[in-house]
Image: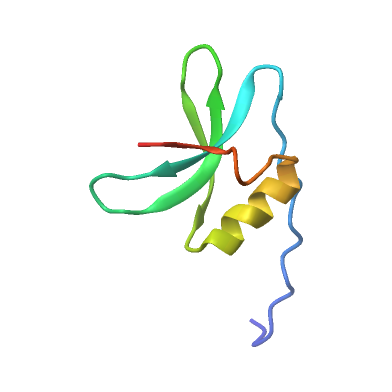
Amino acid sequence: MSLFRKKEEKKPVLFEPESEEPVVHKSICTGETTVGFAHRVSGRYRDVRKVSSEAEIEAFCREVGADPKTIRTIY
């Protein structure tokens, strides 16, 4: 085992813009914030990653081509 790990390459975030929208999900129980996608018809949420700051939310928005000012927050 090596003391130094290779930096993991970020995989592109894949989603279907026709049927999914990027959203911020906040837990009402724990306060944890994640970003992911909500299906436009069923509302089903698909988690991508945990975030801990507005900068991380903005980075997610840049990755998926969404406007950080208009991204919806679900609970």
Which residue appears farthest toward the top when viewing the image?
41
Asked if residue 49 lies left or right of residue 1, the reply is left
Q: How many marks?
A: 0
Look at the image and tell me in which quarter the N terminus lies: bottom right
Percent coordinates x, y for residue 50 in the rendering = 49, 54
Which residue appears farthest toward the left when viewing the image?
29
Percent coordinates x, y for residue 51 in the rendering = 50, 57
Which residue appears farthest toward the bottom when viewing the image?
3
Identify the residue at image location x=69%, y=85%: 4
Asked if residue 27 lies left or right of residue 68, the reply is left
Q: Quadrant of residue 19?
A: top right
Percent coordinates x, y for residue 15 in the rendering = 69, 30
Asked if residue 37 lies left or right of residue 33, the reply is right
Identify the residue at image location x=26%, y=44%: 28
Identify the residue at image location x=74%, y=74%: 6
Which colouring convention does the figure follow? rainbow
Which residue appears farthest toward the front when viewing the image?
69
Look at the image and tell me in which quarter the C terminus lies: top left
Identify the residue at image location x=53%, y=11%: 41
Q: Is residue 27 above or below residue 1?
A: above
Q: Nearer the viewer, residue 21 or 46?
A: 21
Q: Quadrant of residue 17?
A: top right
